[in-house]
Image: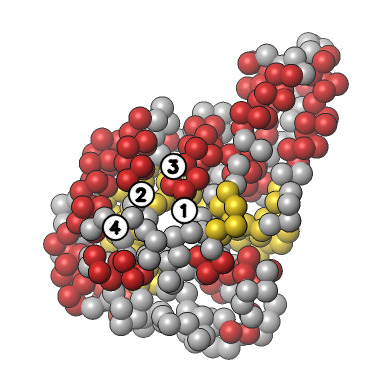
């Protein structure tokens, strides 16, 4: 379901724009669609046709998504495995400090070689209402004041649904525009569409390396745009929107953590209106990649920071529950065996 279909269904039972707005706000708060009626003295809070017609629509909305399982992590995050109406699974993550990471696709077509989600390819798109439903479900558990589109999928490959959701969350969802974060591998359409939006989200750009040849290997189906050109495009959007850009760098031992990469990243990003997020790889036994040592991670951060680049280390949330991005769904779908997963320090872990 797309948001516009939801609104058309409401209009079909006689809801006027003011009624649709109330229903929107109730849903996005994680409340029943008719929330508020019992607190109003007036029986005209909703017309009779809306009160009578709302239950079947509410049932349809409720069926869009449900929480299949919850996984609490030591870092304060809560990973949610969300089952959609057709039985497909996606992940969303309640982050510390009232954030939520949502998915925009079931699977992903980019095929990043270090990403569990990409191993299954793209199965289907999420409708804008399914994206918003992840926020509604999460808000039933705890407050959500920031939404990042960094879960399963490449948001630019589901552009219309993602932009509809962003517009809705930035208005009736009561989320500040800079607290909506659109993540992309660098699709050119992003830099064309986002500046035109009424609700302009912040931007996160998956960089991962300064070398064009290595980036093509790591992100085999991403647009062939050189890293320095991507940074210039990102800088232009950051300056235009007023929100610093987030450059994402999944740190892979012996691949993109060399001194040469540190030097090149410092030259590329120094003075830019943004921050470099280092994301140490979440190791899986038998994979082609490994997580760098804690010493190497600290060295990479310190080197960039001392070179004038604001740099932060951001672990993929939920690693202690074997819940790095895409792993919960992969386990549920039988794509990976939990016994193959390793904790951060390389210890074996029993199946869950």
Going from N to C along the chain, the mark reached first, 2 or 3, is: 3
Q: Quadrant of residue 255?
A: bottom left
Above or below, 350 relative to 143? below
Crowding near pointer 2: few (<14 within 10 Å), some, many (20+)? some
Residue appearing at x 66%, y 85% in the figure: 350
Above or below, 192 relative to 185? above
Going from N to C along the chain, the mark reached first, 1 or 2, is: 1
Crowding near pointer 1: few (<14 within 10 Å), some, many (20+)? many
Q: In whole angstroms, how far apart are the C-alphas of marks 2 and 3?
A: 21 Å
Q: Quadrant of residue 331?
A: bottom right
Quarter of the rendering occupied by the C terminus: bottom right
**Which of 301 and 337 lies nearest the eye of the viewer?**
337
Evaluate if marks 2 and 3 touch, with contact meaning CB atoms under 8 Å apart: no
Residue appearing at x 73%, y 52% in the figure: 86
Q: What residue sits right under mark 2 in the picture?
A: 187
Above or below, 141 relative to 43? below
Q: What secondary structure is marked by label 1?
A: loop
Q: What residue sits right under mark 4 in the picture?
A: 224
The label shown at residue 306 is none
Q: In whole angstroms, how far apart are the C-alphas of marks 4 and 3?
A: 29 Å
Evaluate if marks 2 and 4 touch, with contact meaning CB atoms under 8 Å apart: no
Going from N to C along the chain, the mark reached first, 4 or 3, is: 3
Is 243 placed left or right of 68 in the picture? left
Going from N to C along the chain, the mark reached first, 2 or 4, is: 2
Q: What secondary structure is marked by label 2?
A: loop
Q: In whole angstroms, how far apart are the C-alphas of marks 1 and 3?
A: 19 Å
Q: What residue sits right under mark 1 in the picture?
A: 154
Q: What secondary structure is marked by label 3?
A: helix
Crowding near pointer 3: few (<14 within 10 Å), some, many (20+)? some
Q: What residue sits right under mark 3 in the picture?
A: 179
């Amino acid at each position: 379901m797309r948001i516009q279909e939801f609104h058309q269904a409401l209009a079909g039972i006689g809801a006027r724009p003011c009624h649709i707005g109330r229903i929107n706000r109730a849903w996005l708060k994680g409340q029943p669609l008719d929330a508020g009626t019992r607190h109003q003295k007036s029986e005209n809070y909703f017309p009779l046709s809306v009160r009578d017609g709302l239950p079947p629509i509410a049932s349809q909305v409720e069926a869009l998504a449900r929480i299949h399982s919850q996984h609490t992590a030591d870092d304060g995050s809560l990973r949610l495995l969300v089952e959609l109406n057709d039985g497909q699974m996606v992940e969303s993550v309640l982050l510390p400090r009232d954030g939520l990471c949502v998915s925009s696709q079931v699977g992903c077509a980019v095929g990043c070689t270090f990403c569990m989600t990409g191993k299954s390819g793209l199965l289907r798109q999420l409708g804008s209402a399914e994206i918003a439903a992840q926020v509604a479900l999460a808000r039933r558990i705890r407050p959500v004041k920031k939404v990042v589109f960094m879960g399963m999928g490449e948001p630019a490959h589901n552009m219309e649904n993602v932009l509809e959701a962003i517009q809705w969350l930035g208005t009736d969802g009561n989320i500040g525009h800079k607290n909506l974060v659109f993540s992309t591998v660098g699709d050119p359409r992003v830099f064309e569409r986002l500046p035109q939006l009424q609700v302009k989200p912040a931007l996160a750009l998956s960089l991962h390396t300064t070398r064009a040849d290595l980036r093509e290997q790591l992100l085999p189906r991403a647009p062939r745009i050189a890293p320095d050109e991507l940074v210039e495009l990102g800088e232009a959007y950051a300056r235009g929107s007023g929100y610093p850009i987030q450059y994402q760098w999944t740190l892979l031992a012996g691949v993109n953590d060399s001194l040469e990469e540190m030097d090149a990243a410092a030259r590329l990003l120094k003075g830019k209106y943004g921050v470099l997020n280092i994301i140490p790889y979440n190791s899986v036994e038998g994979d082609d990649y490994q997580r760098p040592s804690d010493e190497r991670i600290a060295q990479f951060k310190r080197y960039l920071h001392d070179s004038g680049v604001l740099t932060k280390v951001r672990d993929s949330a939920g690693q202690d529950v074997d819940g790095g991005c895409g792993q919960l769904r992969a386990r549920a779908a039988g794509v990976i065996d939990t016994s193959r997963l390793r904790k951060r320090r390389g210890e074996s872990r029993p199946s869950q």
